[in-house]
Image (tube, grey):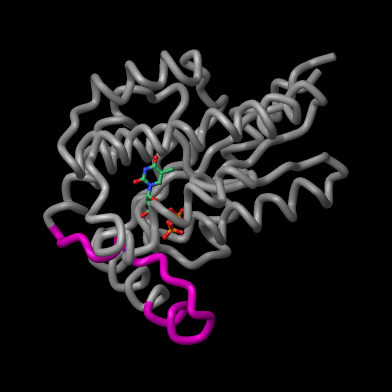
Amino acid sequence: MRRGFFITFEGLDGSGKTTQLRRLEAALTAEGRTVVSLRQPGGTALGDRIRAVLLDSRSETELGGIAPEAEMALMFADRAQSLGQVIQPALAAGSVVLCDRYTDSSEAYQGAGRGLGSERILAMHQAVCNGFQPDLTVLLLPPLAGSLLRARHRNDRQQATQGVNENRFEREGDAFYERVYAQYQAIAAREPQRVVAIADEAGIGVIHKIVVRIVRERILAMTP
Ligand code: TYD
């Protein structure tokens, strides 16, 4: 049997990638495909615990901060678990796997944002994930300022209404996010076969149509 398809969504916090992932999931499910979606960090029981440590801004005080290398290693510990427990089995069963963030996030946030450098992230990706890459990566790169505003508002809202604290990254300054953004652009330029960047700031419906077209052209057209 043909292996399923592995599609990741990437972009800054507030870029709209999660909304687009859900819309694509609905469209593919309506076509009768089996879709498995997850996010990183998270998506497994272990991953949810790692996520809580990584994203909670209280980690800064209660844990005395998280060293950049520890942050990188925790992101990859989460990834290894989700590859083993969810992604690989689903692909082997022929499903379409949609993952909200993957190793490009580590390269952008830990590699560029935290300054660890791409080489260390890519070496870790080889060691931990055996270099396993998505068939397609949809990179949403609308202009930086709007994404940041949306992400910061959303997290304030979540904390107020649900008591969820996932602010650790949103507290970073604009310079951090400028590095993340530039690294995403560099990844798209380096790997045009895998990564499709959508830089438009259009409505959700317009972007969805573009995403569906790309998925059909680049991936689903390969279905026998
Ligand atoms: P996510 O919940 O996807 O945030 P959002 O929905 O706001 O985009 O991701 C949580 C945060 O984790 C996000 O700020 C990016 C960060 N992150 C990394 O720094 N490195 C990684 O490898 C991953 C997967 C996420």
Taking the image as shown, residue 6 lies to the left or right of residue 113, namely right
Residue farthest left in this picture: 175
Relative to 34, say whether 61 is above or below: below
Please state, as top left, top right, bottom left or bottom right, where the N terminus lies in the image.
top right
Relative to 217, say whether 18 is above or below: below
Residue 199, position as x, y percentages in the image: 35, 50
Q: Residue at x 82, y 25 (%)?
A: 93
Residue 41, position as x, y percentages in the image: 49, 46
Of residue 201 and residue 75, the one placed in the foreground of this image is 75
Please state, as top left, top right, bottom left or bottom right, where the C terminus lies in the image.
top right
Residue 12, position as x, y percentages in the image: 35, 53
Q: Residue at x 26, y 48 (%)?
A: 66
Taking the image as shown, residue 66 lies to the left or right of residue 131, namely left
Q: Which residues are magenta?
A: 156-174
Q: Residue at x 20, y 38 (%)?
A: 112
Q: Is residue 162 magenta?
A: yes
Of residue 2 and residue 198, the one placed in the foreground of this image is 2
Relative to 54, say whether 14 is above or below: below
Taking the image as shown, residue 95 lies to the left or right of residue 186, namely right
Residue 212, position as x, y percentages in the image: 63, 46
Q: Residue at x 47, y 36 (%)?
A: 102
Q: Is residue 153 magenta?
A: no
Quadrant of residue 86 in the image?
top right
Quadrant of residue 223 in the image?
top right
